[in-house]
Amino acid sequence: MKVGYNFGIFVYKQLVSLASLKNKKAKKMIQGHKEIFRYLSENADPQGGYIWIHASSLGEFEQGRPIIESIKAAMPEKKVLVTFFSPSGYEVRKNYSNADLICYLPFDLPGNVRRFLDIVKPSQAIFIKYEFWANYLNELASRHIPTYIVSAIFRSKQVFFRPYGGYFRKILKNFTHLYVQDEPSRLLLSGIGVEHVTVVGDTRFDRVLEIQAHAKKLPLVETFSQGYITMIAGSSWPKDEDVFIEFFNNTPELKLIIAPHEINEEHFRHLTSLLKRPYVFYTQADEESVKKADCLIIDCFGLLSSIYRYGDIAYVGGGFGAGIHNVPEAAVYSLPVIFGPNFKKFKEAKELIACGGAFTVKNKREFVPIVSRLLTDSEYLKTSGTIAGDYIKNNAGASELILRDLYQIPYKK
């Protein structure tokens, strides 16, 4: 099985290289990988001793961020290394000030793994949520480096719990401890003999509460939304926009802010071809133009988490593709949240639907009655939003539990 796993990683690496000829993300990834060992050799402390935190992408990084920043606040002498698998994480956070080193994670091949660990000499490793790289976990265990996973969530369909998943079950036992989101995850792990597990919840709730507390004031967005019910469409893709823009075009009492997931000319052409009401791009807007517009298009990164504060309803994109994006980021502002049908892997989405703080739609036909009721029934709108906000507050606290358990330090809010 080990040979097959290594061959699979090798083939994946070749496919990424091939894709990089046409795909911008893959190209950035390959370029970044070429620089990893030079960067580490030139910048890593020869003594090592790094707390190594690995996040697949930007969302997982945000889950780990409360832990990183609490470590740095309480123990500034500690050195932190952050690695990413995806360009969407690395490119956005490559200059993050609370890490001493930031780079891509080398592909999980034995030679890469040994070389990487020889250079950085981590004192411990923390993986965020989903990352289960067999060679890294095996080598960390063989070197007796304490290794943890936080905000992990497990489902019965994962390979660990399949009859043919013996090799992957073994790698789970390399973790010194697993901090999981819920009791079903603990029970699944217990069923395969993994007992060093604690249920703490999801650190992402702590992070979105931090973001809410430090949200930016955005005068143009405030002017745009004032006096109207405003829907914020965050991280939307074309299939999401096909669902909500037609309703917006025919509903003059509703204003719309769109922060698309991909910011490029092709996406903007798609958006503007659908819009039948006045719109303005954020980077081109002034106070006069936002007053005249019915739709505000956010054509820059880094504002969405603060923009939600100015909304009344949230639509979170991704549910017609690989999976919904960050629902707690919107719900923390006490907004009812709507998203597409691909949410089954997201515990918070399922629980928000169950308690009445979120709604899922499969098409435009299902979208219309939900938003129509939220627009016309002010009590329903308020109640749904309150439920969403309370859900976030009531599920916070994972960061505090992990930090006290691992380092005996408080969570820096």
Image (cartoon, rainbow, N blue to C red):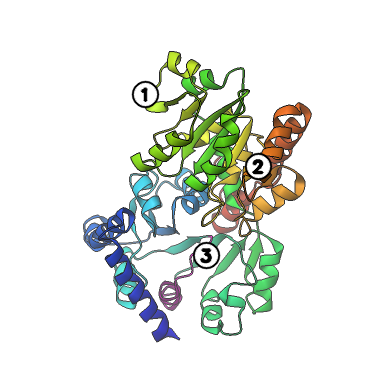
The residue under label 2 is: 367
Q: Residue at x 51, y 77 (%)?
A: 171
Label 3 to label 2: alpha-carbon separation? 41 Å
Q: Is residue 115 above or below residue 247?
A: below
Viewed as shown, does residue 280 lie left or right of 333? left
Q: Quadrant of residue 37?
A: bottom left
Viewed as shown, does residue 235 lie left or right of 404? left
Q: Residue at x 30, y 76 (%)?
A: 111
**Residue 237 in view here:** no
Is disc 2 surrounded by few (<14), some (14 to 19) or many (20+) residues within 10 Å? some
Query: SS class of the residue under badge 3?
Result: strand
Residue bounds of the magenta highlight: 129-144
The residue under label 1 is: 284
Instruction: Give the foreground label among 2 and 1.
Output: 2
Q: Quadrant of the N terminus?
A: bottom left
Of mark 2 and mark 1, the one earlier in the sequence is: 1
Q: Nearer the viewer, residue 28 or 265?
A: 265
Q: Residue at x 55, y 36 (%)?
A: 245
Q: Position of residue 95 (x, y in %)?
A: 33, 44
| Picture disc at residue 148 | 3
